[in-house]
Image (tube, helix red, strand yellow):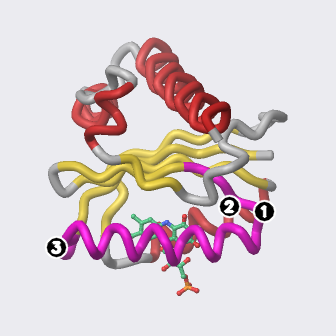
Amino acid sequence: MKRALYVSKAMVPFSYIDIVSLTKQSAARNRQYEVTGYLCYSNNTFFQYIEGEKPVVNRLLHQLREDKRHRFIAEVASDNHDVRLFSSWAMKYLTCSDLTEVHLDGFVSNSILYLKDNFSDKGIKLRLLWRQVMLISQMHDAHLARI
Ligand SMILES: Cc1cc2nc3c(=O)[nH]c(=O)nc-3n(C[C@H](O)[C@H](O)[C@H](O)COP(=O)(O)O)c2cc1C
C-alpha cells in the first residue's frame, strides 16, 4: 500500500457545486481502483490524501499532476503503509465545518505554511502533517461508529 498527501493551487475557479461534482466523479473512479481518502478545499487550495495499492496510487498521482485544473505546490508521500485508514471514504469532501468539528479548522492554511517554509524542520512538519491525517482518520472512525 502507498499513501500520499499533496497540496495544490486551483488554476480555474471552483464553485461549491464544482467541488461536489469533482468529488463524486473521483469517488466513482476510486471505487473501481480501491483508492480511498479525502479532499479539502479552501482559499483556492486543495489538500488531498489518497491511499491504495502502490501502482494505482502512483498512476493517480501522475494523472493529478497532469490535470491542468490545479498545480501541485507540495507533495508528501509514504510507502510501506499496511493499514487503510479511510476504508469507507472513496473520496470524502471535507468542508471547513467538518474540520472545525475535530478542531482542525486551520488545517489547510497551517499545512500550506508548514510546507512552504523552505522545508526547515522537515521532520517535525511531516510528523505534524501525518498527525493531522490521524486526527481526520479518527473522525472517519467516529462517522462509521454512528452508522
Ligand atoms: C483536486 C483534484 C482531485 C482529484 N481527485 C481525484 C481522485 O481522487 N481520483 C480520480 O480518479 N481522479 C481525481 N481527479 C481527477 C484526475 O485529475 C483526472 O482528471 C482523472 O483521474 C481522469 O484522468 P484521465 O483523464 O487521464 O483519465 C482529481 C482532480 C482534481 C483537480
From the top left corner, tell me how far across and down residue 65 is, in percent: 46, 67
- Tell me the kind of residue under disc 3: Pro
Residues at discs 1 and 2 in contact (Cβ within 8 Å): yes
Q: Is residue 24 above or below residue 49?
A: below
Q: Which residue does the numbered mark 2 point to in the structure image?
A: 58
Q: Which residue is mark 3?
A: 13
The percent coordinates of residue 68 (x first, y second) are: 34, 78
What is the residue that sits farthest to the front in this orientation? 147
Q: Residues within 10 Å of mark 1 (few under 14, many from 20)?
A: few
**Quadrant in which residue 86 is drawn:** top right
Q: Nearer the viewer, mark 3 or mark 2?
A: 3
* Stretch in magenta: 11-37
Amino acid at circle 1: Pro
**106 left or right, relative to 136:** left
Q: Main secondary structure of the magenta part?
A: helix
**Three-letter amino acid code of the residue under disc 2:** Asn
Above or below, comparing residue 119 to residue 16 in the picture:
above
Which residue carries the number 1 mark? 55
The kind of secondary structure element at disc 3 is loop
